Image (cartoon, helix red, strand yellow):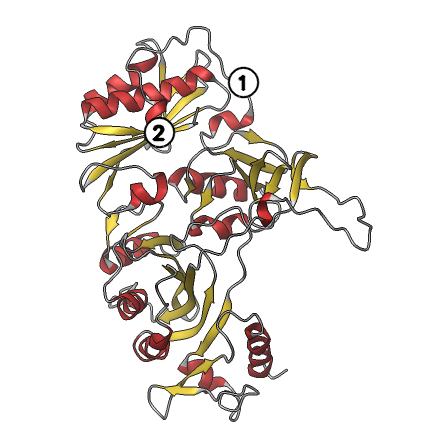
Amino acid sequence: MTKDVIALTQRMPDPWAMLAGLLSGGPDKLVDTAGEGAVVRLCDEEGRPLVSVEAPLLVQVAGEAERLLGATPPPLPYWWTEARATTGVEEAERLAGTFAARLAALADGSAWPPEAAQSLAVVKTEGVSVAPTPAAAQPAVDVLTDKVAVVIQDRPVIAMTAWLQDAIQTAAGAELGLQVVTPPGTTLSPAVRDSLSNWPSRWVVRDERDGYYDGQSGAVLRWQDGMFQPVAAADATADDPRTPVAASYQEVTDTGDQQLALTFRTVHPADERLVLGGALESIWRELTGEPPAGWGTAEPANLPWSPRQMTDLAYERAPEPTWFVVVGTPDRPGLATVRVTRTKAGVEEHVTLMFGYGPDEEPPVESLPRVAEVLATRHRLLSMLVQVRKARRDLAVPPRFEGPGVPLAFVLGAEEVRQMPGDRARNTPLSKPPVPLGPKTRPAMYYPLPGDPLDLSGWQDFERLMRHLKGE
């Protein structure tokens, strides 16, 4: 049975509906709160949590339940309420299912997954106890060692939920890695990928043939010395410490899907006129003809697109950085992560954006110079890298090999061009000359990278360009 159960309801679960769900373990079950009241927990007789329930979230963005759960939600707007059961306790999993089933029945909705929420009856939990491990106080963490925190997830897509964010932050604060363990059919949201890329954090995939492997590198893993680590190959040596690659990871099928990825940075003066998200919206409109659909501080993205609301939230959190996820409409898959930080230069936005295209669709490469000019002339662009790669149209990250992106263009902002000595920004070793953008007296530079967009030799051109711009 799954460890997570979610109620998707037309109406907000009122206090009586929540109470009925919380009594799924009987009226004598202990109730506790955490996260300044944002999490309610059903506990055993010792006060250790059996089930943790997140505060209901109002979702006003189409396609999020379908993208993250493969579920059909009620019409927009609807309420998303998550319950997470303590791993390895059957009664706890049944409690979570009954809680979600009761909420769905009382607030007009459904529960995911359907098989986990089939009973409304009180779950007998007399004598049930949770092991007194340090992880028990963290509802998102299943195993805790002196090296890593381990999260076991059984969801179609591992998303950057509020719970997973909390686990990542808690692990980082304790100087631990985070390792997420999933079954083989699970994928990652792009919003999670980078958070699991730094050792000893990793995505651990269960596999029938090789036991466990890293979903992003394919390295076969074993539980060793308090964490999942790569297995040494039979012919490995100290000078060549190779590790075997799981057979499942190497089973690649070319569907013809592609992704267009743009990574860019902008910087703005820190004044009361600042509105964040303008650069991202401009790109989105240029490449799709419409603005983003929604945003949030976690997945699911639950709020309709609003640069003003994003700005207000970042202002409230300053000088601490703020992270956002931004999504597109279901018919044009798009996802961006935005990190807003306060620097000496002002307020900086670091954006990673990608769009998915099927085999009968072509990425709008011809629009890239126009996109670059809009950013350079209107949004104080520092730099941008554009890539194309063979990868899924729905943007989900599978536990299979996906080739690296190939650079199509690099853009240098006007201020960076101005600071370079002489004509270094204009005279490059590339076969195609750069294209000036904006005013002639203060241009930005667009560097088209030659070659086939799916030819890996494009990285050689990019590296030559970077060495040249650095004066090496």
Residue carrying label 1 = 131
Q: Secondary structure at mark 2?
A: loop
The kind of residue on which mark 1 rests is Ala
Which quadrant of the figure has residue 21?
A: top left
Q: Is residue 363 above or below residue 35?
A: below
Q: Indicate the position of residue 232 as horizontal and vertical percent values.
A: 75, 44
Query: Which part of the image, by quadrant, shows the N terminus?
Result: top left
The numbered mark at residue 430 is none
Q: Secondary structure at mark 1?
A: loop
- Tell me the distance, in whole angstroms, between the alpha carbons under discs 2 and 1: 26 Å
Marks 2, 1: nearer the viewer: 2
Q: Nearer the viewer, residue 87 or 145?
A: 87
The kind of residue on which mark 2 rests is Pro
Q: Indicate the position of residue 364 as horizontal and vertical percent values.
A: 34, 71
Which quadrant of the figure has residue 143?
A: top right
Q: Are the residues tagged 2 and 1 within 8 Å (C-beta)?
A: no
Residue carrying label 2 = 113
Left or right: where does residue 471 sit relative to residue 259? Answer: right
- At a point 81% along the width and 47% down the height, the residue shown is 235
Q: Nearer the viewer, residue 435 or 302?
A: 435
> For mark 2, does the 10 Å Cα neighbourhood hold few (<14), some (14 to 19), or many (20 or more) residues?
many
Q: Is residue 29 above or below residue 85?
A: above
Count the marks.
2
- At a point 38% along the width and 8% down the height, the residue shown is 124
Q: Indicate the position of residue 404 as horizontal and vertical percent values.
A: 54, 62
> For mark 1, does the 10 Å Cα neighbourhood hold few (<14), some (14 to 19), or many (20 or more) residues?
few
